[in-house]
Amino acid sequence: MAERMQGPLGQPVIVENVTGAAGNIGVGRVARAAPDGYTLVAGIWSTHVVNAAIYTLPYDVLNDFEPILLTSRNAQIIVARKTMPADDLKGLIAWLKANPDMAAVGTSGVGSPQHVFAVLFQNTTGTHFRFVPYRGGVVAMQDLIAGRIDLIFADQTTSLPQVRSGSIKAYAVTGNSRLAAAPDIPTVDEAGLPGFYCSVWNALFAPKGTPKDVIIKLNAAAVSALAEPGVRQRAAEAGQQIVPRDEQTPAALAALQRAEIEKWWPIIKAAGIRAE
């Protein structure tokens, strides 16, 4: 996207990867930046929804940023070790109910998508299982392949190659449509858990107070970039579904962020999830 945005903006667009505190260091830098349109943040579901519920932040995820646009979503895949007795999602839920607190579910740590989505799954299905935190999704996937854990609510990048090779089982996609990269995996609606939608979305934000005309210009450049076939192909290869054009507006992103906060904060707080 950065490369394709350079033309419409008439200047270089530099990507700086800022690590630390689950994205909070980089996001905080943008919250404190001058609102001139020259410093933006590529935020995600975790940085602009979850982190505000599990960390004490020096900024407000809603009020210290100006939404530019939603770029993409990454629906997850419910996957299990290949020796799991259940052959479909209904069977998996029945097995979990019959074996309470026996299954081990891998996550990328406290408050990660795998953790929060699995909490919602427990709440929705009335199942109970143990959480096993890892330092990353790849490490968790290695233990799933080895049969040391039972289940992961996994991203497409780490899970699909293993599903295709037969190393793990896939039960459902946590979205309302099947994946182009894996059309044989049913949606949660089709698999018997209707409405269980969980995805990690990606978006662009600017510091609070960035002028409206600047936001409009940045939005137009990003929309143009997302329409490029090369960008769309790269996104698909990374397991990202670029959102429809009518969702690529500042207003749509603002509405989504508020709706997601209203949905996820009560779930996270009721589960007592806090980052230490």
Image (cartoon, rainbow, N blue to C red):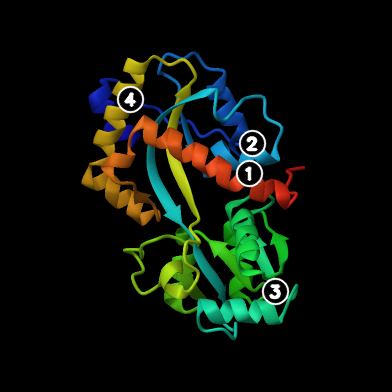
Marks 4/2: CA–CA distance: 26 Å
- Labels 2 and 3 touching (C-beta < 8 A): no
10 Å crowding of disc 2: few (<14), some (14-19), many (20+): some
Residue sitting at 66 percent across and 69 percent down?
126
- Labels 1 and 2 touching (C-beta < 8 A): yes
Residue at image mark 2: 52
Residue at image mark 3: 103
Q: Position of residue 222 (x, y in %)?
A: 31, 33
- Compared across the picture, whether 179 is left or right of 107 comes to left
Image quadrant occupied by the N terminus: top left
Image quadrant occupied by the C terminus: top right
Residue at image mark 1: 265
Residue at image mark 4: 218
Marks 3/4: CA–CA distance: 47 Å
- Compared across the picture, whether 148 is left or right of 225 comes to right
Marks 4/1: CA–CA distance: 30 Å
For marks 3 and 4 on the same chain, the one whose residue lies earlier in the sequence: 3
Residue sitting at 61 percent across and 33 percent down?
24
What is the three-letter code of the residue carrying label 2? Ala
10 Å crowding of disc 1: few (<14), some (14-19), many (20+): some
Label 4: state its secondary structure. Answer: helix
What is the three-letter code of the residue carrying label 3? Ala
Marks 3/1: CA–CA distance: 25 Å
What is the three-letter code of the residue carrying label 1? Trp
